Amino acid sequence: MIETGKSWRTDGDDITLVFVAAGRDEIDLAYLGPRLPDGEDLSALVRAGTFGLHENEPDAPRIGGLLPQAHDGYRGRPAYQIRSGKRQADCGFQLAHIQANGPNMMATWVEKSTGLQVDMSWEIVGPRTVEVTMELMVDDEGDILLDSASSLSMPLPRRFNHMTAFSGRWAREMQAKTTRIGPQAIEMRSANGKPGFDAGNWLVFHGDDGQNNDADCLGIHASSCGDHMTHVVQDQDGRTCLSIEALRQPGGIALNASDITNLGQITLILGDNQDHLTQLFHDHVRTNVLPQRTDWGPRKVHLNSWEALAFDLDEAKLKTLASAAADLGIERFVLDDGWFKGRRGDDAGLGDWQVDEAIFPDGLTPLIDHVHGLDMDFGLWVEPEMVSPDSDLYRAHPDWCLHDDRADRPTERNQLVLDLSREDAFAYIHDALTALLDNHDIAYLKWDHNRRLFPDNGLQQFAIQRLLGKLRQQYPAVEIESCSSGGGRVSFSMLQYCHRIWPSDNNDPIERLRIMESWTRFLPFEILGNHVGPSPNPITGRRTDMDFRAKVALFGHMGVETNPAAMSEDERAILRAHIALYKQWRDVLHGGAFRQLRHPESSIYGQMVLSGQRALAVVAQTAFAENFNVAPVRLPGLDADTLYSVTLPKPWPQKSSAYLADPDAWESGFVLSGRALAERGLALPLTYPETAWLIAIEEQKS
């Protein structure tokens, strides 16, 4: 038995964690913050942070700690609920071992009645980044069932009394909502295997309402690409506990004798403020998550065929579309849905991943050769996890889909989900994809996932990661985009295998500004697909100018999702100019330090990326301003004493440019210090809705 009060510390470059034995079998987190001095007295730190007893609590209060248990007076949420046979086990986890060494803390508990072993790891993997993993191991005497199992249980430092979570729906993802933490418990959960539309797997804890940028904050991500449940509970003494179940299965998690089960990884990042937190997330993603990030070349401009042609496609139309794309400077042509056998609409064909000879009598090779002749890469849309009831695959293997023999097989979007935990279904899809990649020069797969998982056997996420992992090994040069009705399945688990995500099916630029504002709090621009869509927008019905759509799309991994033939010559010229600007600035956008620009006008959005001696910003107005002359746009983060040349790259928004005070100077460039840009800022005409400006900032040569 470990002595109560004994403490351990782990350190990173700029962070310290202090763990303490808080009672029998309890380990608590006593400190999470910037790195402490090497000689810090941990005993004094723990005792100075311990409250004395009050009149209405046990003489030896149970606080739960990192593995809370429902006994001996603790009435919070337990980390584990176990059934053995038909009996609900009265969990009694006993601490068997704890060790802290450098950046790692490892602890082991064993449940006395079932023998279930829990191995917990807290590992510092970056200057302020911690990864928490839990592994479960069953002894060789029998099977058990976990009704619930936490991937993370921890007390929140008391300075974090607000939480921002991100929920939404299809075409309106990542709606930020800030809540003050209080005595009412907060529960967030996802369902049906699409966690991106529900809150709980991206969280920020902070000490105010989230509107300021001057206090530290804690960002947390549950990296499972399956469902999750998150609880934030404050007890009557003001102690707040966070619990995340990042591996959830209907009916519980079955653990067989001698099994080892990983409950998914939780990432914690501590920022000095929200801008710092964002940069730490971006650094972590680039360094530790994305596949071979340092080997990527420039992020190529896409044209996706969907909004241009949908299912009304043939070889001649696609070649015409590809030629029009190349004329705009586009570098990759992606053939979306409708190319495979029997696919004339969204009610048939999924699962039959063979080229439709009725549309392509000579296969895809003539189209691919045409695209390559225009100096573009070729990409292809697939949805390998799904099957249409009207397909050869389903007719041959109706039991390969997720289903319950006691119930009907309800569809969504006229499709069912292939059970890829079955070896035969897995092998079929793997072989179909490898045949496509072996027989065609395909540089890019747009991997879609449009249907929710119902029923859900809880195993699909592991099968998908296995499939993606095999394909990445076999075809390391092929880029993969993860799309799930837009942003329905975005996690570090998916980004280990993918080069890009599709943040939303909604290309409306006003909606995209808000959606991208949330995603960029955690993910860098180079993996966030951002496309110029048609006008009117097919989802919102809104009409917007090409200049506005192009400037918004430039800040991300830029693409086009409309038909150049439907544009006027002026629109094509404006889009062509912005594609050229993207190519000129993408090294900055996709490798620099991100800054969110805050403005007192609530309808003004601003973002800036700094890299070396250059920076590029976009400022966009989405509604009619309260005042004709809005407050100047301030640009923080530049070196205060350095002089910069500041220009507004053309093309300019036509109507608003008439209100520039000195157009010639804005074109040739003002020379201003970093301090002037941060403190006073730039007076830009942003009165009118759907107006955007690019701001180019380059260090003045001496």
Image (tube, helix red, strand yellow):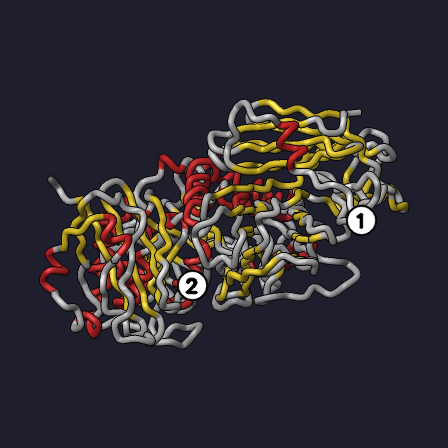
Who is closer to the viewer here, 449 or 29? 29
Q: Would you say 417 lies left or right of 652 here? A: right
Circle 1 SS class: loop
Can you see residue 308? Answer: no
Locate the N terminus by quadrant.
Answer: top right
User: Mark 2 or mark 1: which comes first in sequence?
Assistant: 1
Image disc number at residue 514: 2
Give the total of numbered labels: 2
Mark 1 neighbour class, 10 Å CA radius: few under 14, some 14 to 19, many 20 or more: some
Reply above or below: 138 against 429. Answer: above
Circle 2 SS class: helix
Who is closer to the viewer here, 379 or 330? 330
Say which amino acid is labelled 1: Arg
Closer to us: mark 2 or mark 1? 1
For the point 74% across and 34% down, the residue is: 22
Can you see residue 213? Answer: yes
Q: Position of residue 660 (x, y in %)?
A: 16, 68
Mark 2–mark 1 Cα distance, whole angstroms, equals 40 Å
Who is closer to the viewer here, 343 or 54? 54
Label 1 belongs to which residue? Answer: 75
Locate the C terminus by quadrant.
Answer: top left
Q: Would you say 211 lies left or right of 634 here? A: right
